[in-house]
Amino acid sequence: MIRINITSVFVDDQAKALAFYTDKLGFVTKHDIPMGEHRWLTVVSPQDPDGTELLLEPSEHPAARPFKEALVADGIPFTSFAVDDVHAEFARLSADGVRFVQEPVDMGPVTVATLDDTCGNLIQIATMKS
């Protein structure tokens, strides 16, 4: 059986990304291992500490920056995170200073909103309807 154990998001600054993903989004640090000028830096959901890890990967590859810029220019989220209630998370995160580029919108079987992670990415939060 194949399963996803780690995925990544390219970030402009690992320290800034760690602060945003933990302090604002509520993830917790799983691994923080120095690797030269960068770190093997992963976060996980506190509700699933042994679940899928998100690697906060430096945008060092020459293709990463233009790729991220093109996605942002077109309003395309780099990835999506599940939340129990998009409207509640939108209200909580907005009150905490998180900038949204798209407020919650109903899209048939899912409600989504898109935020700026302050590290060069748009991130979607989504709730599947039951």
Image (cartoon, rainbow, N blue to C red):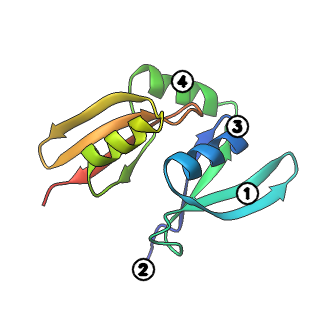
Q: Is 53 placed above or below 110 here?
A: below
Going 45% across and 74% down the picture, which residue do you hit?
2
What amino acid is labelled 4 in the image? Glu
What amino acid is labelled 1 in the image? Trp
Would residue 41 be found to the left or right of residue 118 on screen? right
The numbered mark, 2 or 1, whose residue comes first in the sequence reads 2
Which residue is tagged 3? 13
The numbered mark, 4 or 2, whose residue comes first in the sequence reads 2
Residue 77 can be seen, yes or no: no
- Mark in front: 4 vs 2: 4
Q: Which mark is residue 40?
A: 1
Q: Are marks 3 and 1 in contact (CB under 8 Å)?
A: no
Q: Is 106 placed above or below 45 here?
A: above
What amino acid is labelled 2 in the image? Met
Mark 4, secondary structure of its residue: helix
What amino acid is labelled 3 in the image? Asp
The numbered mark, 4 or 3, whose residue comes first in the sequence reads 3
Give the spatial CA distance, label 2 vs label 3: 35 Å
- Mark in front: 3 vs 1: 3
Quarter containing the C terminus: bottom left
